[in-house]
Amino acid sequence: MIEFNEKFDKIIEKNCEKVLNFIAQELLLPKNIKINLNFVDNDRIQELNKNTRGIDKVTDVLTYPYVNLKPNEKLNISDYKFDIDPTDNTLTIGDIYICVPRAREQAKEYNHSLNREICFLFCHGVLHILGYDHIEERDRVIMEKMQDKVMDALKITRDIVFKSGFVTVIGETNVGKSTLINNLVGEHVSIVSPKSQTTRENIKGIYNDSESQIVFVDTPGYHKRKTVVDDEMDKQIENALTDTEIVLMLIDAKKPLVSQYNEIIKKVNENAKKILLINKVDERTYEKLYPQLADLNIIAKVDEILPISALKGKNLDVLIDMIKKYLPTYNYEMRYYPIDEYTDKNVRHMVAEIIREKALLMLDDEIPHGVQVVVTAYDESKDPIEIYADLYCERENHKAIILGKNGEMIKKISTASRREIEKLIDAHINLQIYVKVKPNWRNDARAINEFGLSISE
């Protein structure tokens, strides 16, 4: 087995597991061996080289064996009985450090995938741990033959087959669009609340792995419109649907499926690939859901239908594979955004949305629709970081409710917001929130623009 130092890339992690399993079977190794695999940056690998090898440079892989073997020498676990971990009955036989930036450079240099490069480096490291070497010519030939055998057997090819594109998520309010994107991306991209009209603008959540980049566009939930802001939210949905490869149509398993489908299909253009997602299936029994799914399969004019639970993560891995099937294919690494970005929004925007999320969760139903947050100052030169924000509402009596008796409510909102923001930026902050009134701002085009919810032409 492999112990990963941190989550990196699911596809690469699975393939590294395959590499180790194949080598273990080929060399008749015991089943309870373990290798610690660490993905590091240039600074860390240079530090390791300097401290342990006396070489001050960046290399692609470093290996530290815990056992002392020669090629093809049988690994006898009984020789290491005092080193077996009693918690999982495993014997750690070595540490491997792979420098991801260097691996990415080499993948580009050799014109093959990052997946292939890292799996090759891991295979190389495992063989080193097991006594293989390449200093002498005879040993080099033996090691290279074994490396080729592993990579060929597992069909981890040099070719780049890269998928990327835009996927728009639409659905009624509170159907779970933001929860879905947050769990697909693995980061807090869109705010989540049981209140309706939580998402007011298109927000991009970016999924990255070694073979794809999927840009999810979270749109406002559609509902009966009453204000200028509501009209703008409709335009945001229309804009997102005009330039997208795939549309994820999200409906609620707790409501009649056919009627929801008939409503949502009206909003999707004919050219886009359509995946109909039945969300919240964890909240319905199979007996009640199956007859409706059968009816839906007959009438739905879509490319795929998939029951999911965005909250519990059910079938989200299936969804990613399904999306990749319909995305454009490139023979090079085609990314619209840098690989370490997970949203198109800046930190100030994310901070404002976190504060609004906490306000939505804690306030009465009649207030949230009129709440908007603007970050007025973000000073990183201070320790802790100083953040000032204005929380707007539409009425004086709403302001009193938001402040609460003796300021208790705004303290709760501030405390919850501070904790979430500190997780986001990994730093301590001093957060000051001021509650202000701007009457009927949701019908005021100038105010809407000032709040960053720009009116579409």
Image (spheres, rainbow, N blue to C red):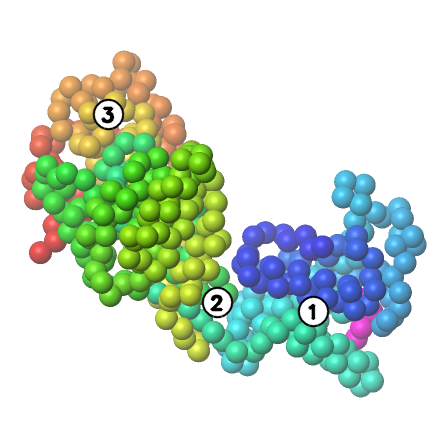
Q: Which residue is mark 2?
A: 211
The amino acid sitting under disc 1 is Cys
Magenta segment, principal secondary structure? loop
Label 2, residues with CA under 10 Å away: few <14, some 14-19, many ≥20? many
Instruction: Residue 221: give x, y in percent of width and height.
Output: 24, 43
Point out the tag, 1 or 3, that comes first from the N-terminus. Answer: 1
- The residues bearing labels 2 and 1 have C-alpha atoms spaced at a distance of 20 Å
User: Is 25 one of the magenta-colored residues?
Assistant: no
Point out the tag, 3 or 2, that comes first from the N-terminus. Answer: 2
Instruction: Residue 282: give x, y in percent of width and height.
Output: 45, 37
Instruction: Residue 107: give x, y in percent of width and height.
Output: 54, 75
Q: Which residue is mark 1?
A: 123
Q: Which residue is mark 3?
A: 365
Quarter in which the C terminus is drawn: bottom left
Residue that protrudes farthest toward the top in the picture:
405
Residue 31 in the figure: left or right of residue 251: right
Q: Quadrant of residue 10?
A: bottom right
- Does the CB distance between marks 1 and 3 fall below 8 Å? no
Q: Quadrant of residue 431?
A: top left
The amino acid sitting under disc 2 is Glu
Q: Which residues are magenta?
A: 129-133
Q: Nearer the viewer, residue 276 or 415?
A: 276
Q: Secondary structure at mark 3?
A: loop
Q: Residue at x 56, y 52 (%)?
A: 7
- The residues bearing labels 3 and 2 have C-alpha atoms spaced at a distance of 43 Å
